[in-house]
Image (cartoon, helix red, strand yellow):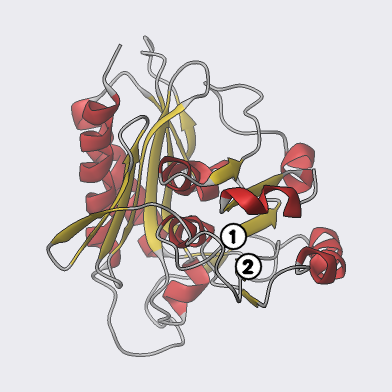
Amino acid sequence: MTDALELLAVAKRAAAAGATVLSKRSTGGTGGEDLGIVNKGEAGDWVTAFDVAAENAVREAITSDRPNDVITGEEHGTTRPKQPTGYRWSIDPLDGTTNFIRNIVYYATSVAVSDADGVWLAGVVHAPALGRIYSAARGHGAWLEEAGKTTRLSGPVQGRQGLILATGFSYDPSTRASQAEGLASLMDGFADVRRLGSAALDLCLVADGTYDAFGERGLNEHDFSAGALIAEEAGCWVRRPRLESPLHGGPSADDRLAAWTCAGALELSGKFPL
């Protein structure tokens, strides 16, 4: 059995490889010129040449260290070696693609790994435009590296006033309509709401205490895999969709659209729908 810290070291190298690709984006312009933009089929669901190049870089970094692990990525799906180890990597090479296109700094490369039972063991969310690297290994806490300083994360401040909820909205029109309809009740007990555009970073901002809670329905596995572990290791209450087949990816499309991913201060665990 591979130690979680060994896997974390691989995840950090892989996420750094993806973030290096993203950091090559020109700092000028908000129209996404020369980014190789293609629409995936739903309004607002974009992919750029940077998404693909970053995923390629992440995959190469993982396979150079662990050639027999399964890899599931947003852009290239799942690849399985002939003799798999039982570990599976979940990659979002560019979480926050619309932000990236519009030159909004909240985007990141997310990399996580689970064992054959679907237990998440290590995760990294590397945000190059923010200069932040969030990371966690199961049983070893969650950490933020920023400006040469490493800080252990401990989640939101307990019992503070003016609670902030983070959320997001699906590209699927019917799911989005349902999310909008339920927002008022979801906001009960919170003073304000934020919609960042990157679920991976939303979860990390709960882990570092910026937000008090995050809840969103309909996320893909690659959106939450690293961030949810980071929040969990920071001591947050976390709920994530169950993996129907740990070695073959996340839940079915119908299950995914119905499932909530939530994280927050322990006393807020009852705020979210089941």
Amino acid type at mark 1:
Ala
Instruction: In the rendered view, tell whether residue 216 sits above or below residue 118.
Output: below
Q: Which residue is mark 2?
A: 165
Q: In which quadrant will I find the C terminus?
A: top right
Left or right: 45 in relation to 231: right
Q: CA distance from mark 1 to mark 2?
A: 5 Å
Left or right: 274 in relation to 198: right
Residue 80 falls in image quadrant = top left
User: Marks 1 and 2: CB-CB under 8 Å?
Assistant: yes
Q: Which residue is mark 1?
A: 213
Dot 2: what SS?
Answer: strand
Q: Position of residue 143 (x, y in %)?
A: 29, 50
Q: Earlier in the sequence, mark 1 or mark 2?
A: 2
Q: Position of residue 3 (x, y in %)?
A: 26, 20
Of 48 and 71, nearer the camera is 71
Number of residue marks:
2
Of 79 and 226, nearer the camera is 226
Of 44 and 139, nearer the camera is 139
Q: Position of residue 94 (x, y in %)?
A: 42, 59
Are there few (<14), some (14-19), or many (20+) residues within 10 Å of tag 2? Answer: many
Residue 20 falls in image quadrant = bottom left
Of 258 and 50, nearer the camera is 258
Q: Position of residue 98 (x, y in %)?
A: 52, 72
Residue extending farthest to the bottom is: 29
Q: In which quadrant will I find the N terminus?
A: top left
Amino acid type at mark 2:
Leu
